[in-house]
Amino acid sequence: MNSNLHVVILGGGFAGLQAAKSLRRADVDITLIDRRNFHLFQPLLYQVATGELSPANISAPLRALLRKQQNARVLLGEVQDIDLERQVVRLTDRELAYDFLVVALGSVHHYFGHDDWEKIAPGLKTIENATEIRRQLLGAFEAAERSLDPEEIRDLLTFAIVGAGPTGCELAGTIAEIARHTLKNDFRNINPADARIVLIEPSEYPLDVYSQPLPSKAAKALQRLGVELVTCTRVTDIHQTHVELLTVGNEQPWRINTRTVLWAAGVKASPIASSLLRQTGMASARGGRIPVQSDTSLKSHPNVFVVGDLASFNHDEKGDLPGLAPVATQMGAHAAKCIVADLNDKSRTGFRYRDRGSMAVIGRYSAVGVIGGWKFHGFVAWFLWLAVHLMYITMFRNRILVLVQWGWTFLTHDRSARLILDGPTTSIPQLAEATGWDNDSAMPHVESTAQETES
Amino acid sequence: MNSNLHVVILGGGFAGLQAAKSLRRADVDITLIDRRNFHLFQPLLYQVATGELSPANISAPLRALLRKQQNARVLLGEVQDIDLERQVVRLTDRELAYDFLVVALGSVHHYFGHDDWEKIAPGLKTIENATEIRRQLLGAFEAAERSLDPEEIRDLLTFAIVGAGPTGCELAGTIAEIARHTLKNDFRNINPADARIVLIEPSEYPLDVYSQPLPSKAAKALQRLGVELVTCTRVTDIHQTHVELLTVGNEQPWRINTRTVLWAAGVKASPIASSLLRQTGMASARGGRIPVQSDTSLKSHPNVFVVGDLASFNHDEKGDLPGLAPVATQMGAHAAKCIVADLNDKSRTGFRYRDRGSMAVIGRYSAVGVIGGWKFHGFVAWFLWLAVHLMYITMFRNRILVLVQWGWTFLTHDRSARLILDGPTTSIPQLAEATGWDNDSAMPHVESTAQETES
């Protein structure tokens, strides 16, 4: 049995995990390599960032998912490089030879040449991103409650979200709901409902991947939630205290004062892409993605497949496939199918994406989307969104827990996963800095028994 | 209304939170100060450390808990010092004057003069402790799976827990269950059931706060779970690779090779205690605690109450009260009662702890405890333990979620909160270091297609 061919899969996201699962009956030995010990259900990551779900609710241990699949093993490891000629994957501490390779390492945030923005404006890709965003959001309300300066309070309660794609809309809508409902009576000095949520988008409408009327429906839904929609506007710079903007048709730059900027504007291929492009001599596609053959393999190396966000698949004249979970899942399955075809000396088929639809949620009760060619919006779309996401989340236990938490939040507006965590950054010096208090320079402020608290 | 007296409460644990709640009808302005924005249900912290519950399941936002209590406000802040003479609390960035002060800052780990052990052997007090322990436990299995050296694998799969009090027994029992059941089929190179779980205790029995036969029942329950009980033995030193031990009646020191040491051996008063002791000229009680009057106030400063783990209450000839949640809760309520008495010009009463019982769980199906003077052990005690903890956990939503997760784990042995998180420490160089692999010095290990995987 030890003469089986070795399939190495890089990445345990939707594409990589599906590739491994689709090979369950194949006579191969599979090694799935991921930096993390869990598969992440990314479509619900924004609900962790906004305190509705816990990280474990949208994660499933990779080992548990592949427990019964005896031809697969999981290896925790960070991929340093791939050597296409020697057919080895280089990890931090060892090399691993492969017969077939499935590269499913996904995408990272794209700050369009302004990598320094990343520190100020976190994106939403990992569990750590989500808890960091949660920390910043809740920390801003806490700092505002402590502040005595009205101007500072206003800036602290201004939240700017860059990019009105699905993630941007989900974040903006949910933050609006938190401010207006969840935190309603939590503070004594500030009114969380005063929060300003600004969604900045270079094109004319939010969610412009959809055709009308969905984008204009989305715009209306966002405005109903109290989100300020700033369209036709580009971010030209991001600072700790403000963002600089430029609106089409107006050459005067302007700014929004804010202490919290979230990045939902774009992704690019994982860094491994440049090495693969260099070795194959190919030009990169949009966002640094790797152009793949119609069977999802590399032209020069048919035993290497690139699937998911990392791949640029452009074979049906509809343009690149979008970076969605269903695309990744189907590509992963297809790569597996090609490997099985090779093992059986059959010919490979071309990949075709079966578009069953996609959706984006905009706060409570509202969503837009297309399913099976039908356009949906409003409450019906929102309900479909819930059902579909509940159906697809990995592991049955997570399904129960997510259902209970959604039901509870729906009924009460309460979000109990509102933990400000993550070690030293949560200490008060950090908050003090954010609010302009300074231990050394400020006059000690001794409050008398005459409290500002109302009773 | 602004002439109300100002009650400042330091700490949002069981004692502080209860003090605030018990003052809900009093004509006072309350400021509750905590470093964190949530109240933590510490008795279930070990279930976060062992991947059964998520941090948010045992936490409740302090603001949400006090939302409806209009005379209370919550302030996130780190207490630097208390000035008893000037009646102010000094935070990092401001001072706060008080008329009444309730100090409920709890305890920290006690390494008995070996503070350097803390880095190697984490204790279990905070959410961060719990996720760190979870990371170490799961990381050890991952590193063992990657290792090729049988001796190293054996050390990685040895888990030493220092101290067989309630926390030590809970941890040891649960780790045994994880190794034997939860991870059963998750690995390909190691057998998690080979794990050695060693519980080290200086006295003759585990849980020796209880009277017999409970300690010997506990010992049997632990052994049934496969925990090695090393009694009458002190830890004399802790290293990255081993612990050094000395057993009573044997002058020869010995060692256990292990990469994972967990500390459950003792706590001492929060650092603020030494400042209070110095200002009052009192001698510290056991573990640096602060001796309090029979009404839980300071002798020299009757408007200052010390409650919970920080207080040494020794007025009924039974010795110090234990550091348990019910003790803290009742003390907090009593301090509030004394403040109300003062406001109404009535005389204060002395505090009496109403001991309704206590329990410790030892793995699945088994616990020992005393309730209302009755001793329980085995399955009945375990079931009572579940019921009591479910009843007392804060917030109704947490109750539902914890119930669902306990039910699921009970039925399937599955623990889905098995995330190795926490940023940079999770990267593989860390694991590589732990296993002795080294990127620079080790020969690249190129695996051939002849896999060690069975198929």
Image (cartoon, coloured by chain):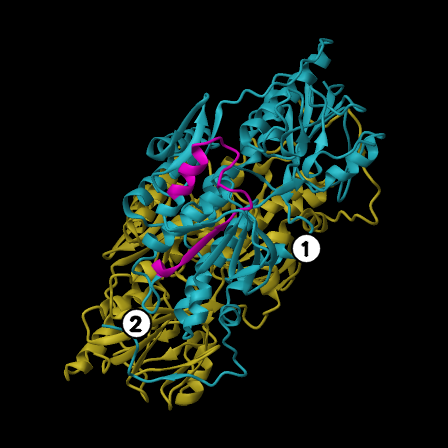
Chain colours: A cyan, B yellow
Residue type, label 1: Thr
Based on the picture, tell me whether residue A216 belongs to the magenta stretch. yes
Q: Is residue A174 above or below residue A447?
A: above
Q: Check the picture and name the quadrant holding the N terminus of chain B.
A: bottom left
- Residue B273 falls inside the magenta stretch: no
Q: Residue at x 48, y 65 (%)?
A: B266
* Front: mark 1 or 2: 1
Q: Would you place residue B115 above or below residue A10 in this image?
A: below
In the image, the segment drawn in magenta is A192-221
Q: Circle 1 sits in a helix, a strand or a loop, which is it?
A: loop
Chain containing the residue with disc 2: B
Q: Secondary structure at mark 2?
A: loop
Q: Position of A98 compared to A423: left or right?
A: right
Q: Earlier in the sequence, mark 1 or mark 2?
A: 1
Q: In the image, residue B293 lies at what x, y percent? A: 29, 81
Horizontal side of A80 relative to B279 (left or right) equals right
Indicate the position of residue B259 as horizontal and vertical percent values.
64, 52
Residue beneath disc 2: B318
